[in-house]
Amino acid sequence: IFNDNGTISEAAGMYVGMDRFEVRKQIAKDLEAAGLIEKIEDYENKVGYSERNPDTATEPRLSDQWFLKMDEISKPAHRAVMEDVIKFVPEKFKNTYNTWMAEIKDWCISRQLWWGHQIPAYYLSDGTFVVAENPEKALEEAMSVTGNAALTLDDLHQDEDCLDTWFSSWLWPISLFNGILEPGNEEIKYYYPTTTLVTAPDIIFFWVARMIIAGYEFVGEMPFKNVYFTGIVRDKIGRKMSKQFGNSPDPFDLIAAYGADGVRMGLMLAAPAGNDVLYDDKLCEQGRNFCNKIWNAFRLVKGWEVADMEQPESSSIATRWFEAKLNATMLEVKDLFDKFRISEALMAIYRLFWDEFSSWYLEMVKPAYGQPIDRTTYNATLHYFDVLLRLLHPFMPFITEELWQHLQERTPGQSIMYALLPDVKEYDKAAVEAMEHAKEVVIGVRGVRAAKNISPREALVLNVIGDWKSAETPVIMKLANLSEINSNAEKDAAAATFMVGTMEFNVPLSANIDVAAELEKLNKELTYYQGFLASVMKKLGNERFVNNAPAAVVEAERRKQADAETKIKNLEESIAALSK
């Protein structure tokens, strides 16, 4: 009943030509005058408003539209995904795809817009229409259809509607290589199909499905082999980032505060495939801190003086271990990339650089203060740094390019972008496992230092209760600052003890601690555990508790009893030994 301008059309039969809002008021007046209104009251209703003009209420209105039949042309695209010819990552999105494609409807491809690709339909004055590539071909078609050879271009009027924006977008994998205008050209033969499409899951049907349909319809082949779905970035309370909510941080402000690589790395680390990211500034802060770690490691390595000297045994062990650890991680990363587990791949590289390279390897090979490093170790370290930068480059392109250029002399035009990773080799598993054991020993000694407030500069003796040999001994002595390691040593009650697996280690303390202060501390611990044991025994001495409590609860209390008794015994032995 509406004309295009919102007035009442002839189809209404009355109020013709009146504005829609005025008609509503007039109807009420006419009904009231006829005595047909019982009462008038205000009530709330949901009224739609134009997104382009928020002051304009919208009205439902039927109009002719152009549709594309989808039932037949969608079938190859449906099968391709359901049969994993095209793989979705994560796979759960196949269900969404299947729901849409199994119940597919004809596609309304016309839009009442004044910009975009105009629909190639041309009308004659009698309402007859033809569809053609351009006006000249439309004129030829119109002459053929009507049999009127006297028609001119002035007799044709092109439909004013535009095609749906997805109608051009669904051709993207093909039109990118000019495959519509030049089918089978060299570029499309070389590049089509592409390997992987990266997109968001909210446009699976709008874009992904339609590109697959177009690929099979116009090229006869899938447009890509894999589709990787990213998550949606949301705020801390789970809302989608939007201008309307004002909850989206300005990327330029984030880059200014945390650096472009810091922002990229922080977000990617928290973005497993297909899962939404709950944004927090702390993610970017973590990325920035990692950039600082990389930069500081670079400054440390490039600040070393290099000399032609024999490689220390500890450095030889360290380089052999890190070579194995690097290859193990590259194998892991390759497997994760193959499975599209991108955030996990980044985490593996992150741990390799932060934990293994910076915290352990560099400490193993670092020369004493003011001393040079041997050239063999230094060259190996530069090689490892180079490989680590290449591994990080897809995630952190700017800092890795900058440091790679300064790691050694490069020729003009050289870039880390083109630098291949070394071939992944089988690694020495025994070297990796042995070093993990050695690191636990070092951590145990460092724990003793921290607990007993012993300076890291003070050399300690390490006793092993049992027969123990380790090829990593030079590394352990360097990192733990030990003067000697004694295997098959006597158990010393006054020593600080720790376990690595089933092997017991202890560090004699009498020469390194304040005995009086240590005795005071041990006596306090003894008093605490004696009180704790008394409370446990009180529970276990209560027949009602033992008989009525669940068996697991009673068993837990008995384990507490055994642990407390063991600790009390060890504390009493330590106190007795220190009191001699």
Image (cartoon, rainbow, N blue to C red):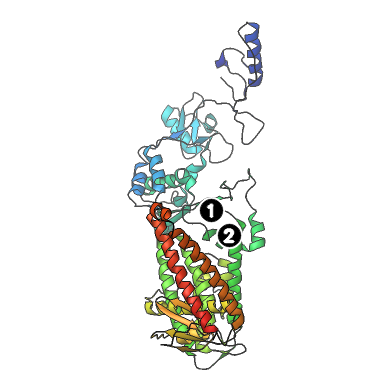
Name the residue located 55 percent from the left edge and 31 percent from the top edge: 154
C-beta proximity under 8 Å, tags 2 and 1: yes
Q: Which residue is mark 1?
A: 277
Residue placed most toward the observer, 13 or 180: 13
Q: Which residue is mark 2?
A: 283
Number of on-image labels: 2
Residue 118 picture location, percent across and down:
53, 38
Quadrant for residue 226, please give it: bottom left
- With 23 as the anchor, is 181 left or right in this view? left
Residue placed most toward the observer, 337 or 75: 337
Residue 31 picture location, percent across and down:
62, 9
Name the residue located 53 percent from the left edge and 53 percent from the top edge: 277
Amino acid on which disc 2 is placed = Leu
Q: Is residue 526 above or below residue 90?
A: below
Name the residue located 40 percent from the left edge and 65 percent from the top edge: 335
Marks 2 and 1 sit apart, C-alpha to C-alpha, by 10 Å
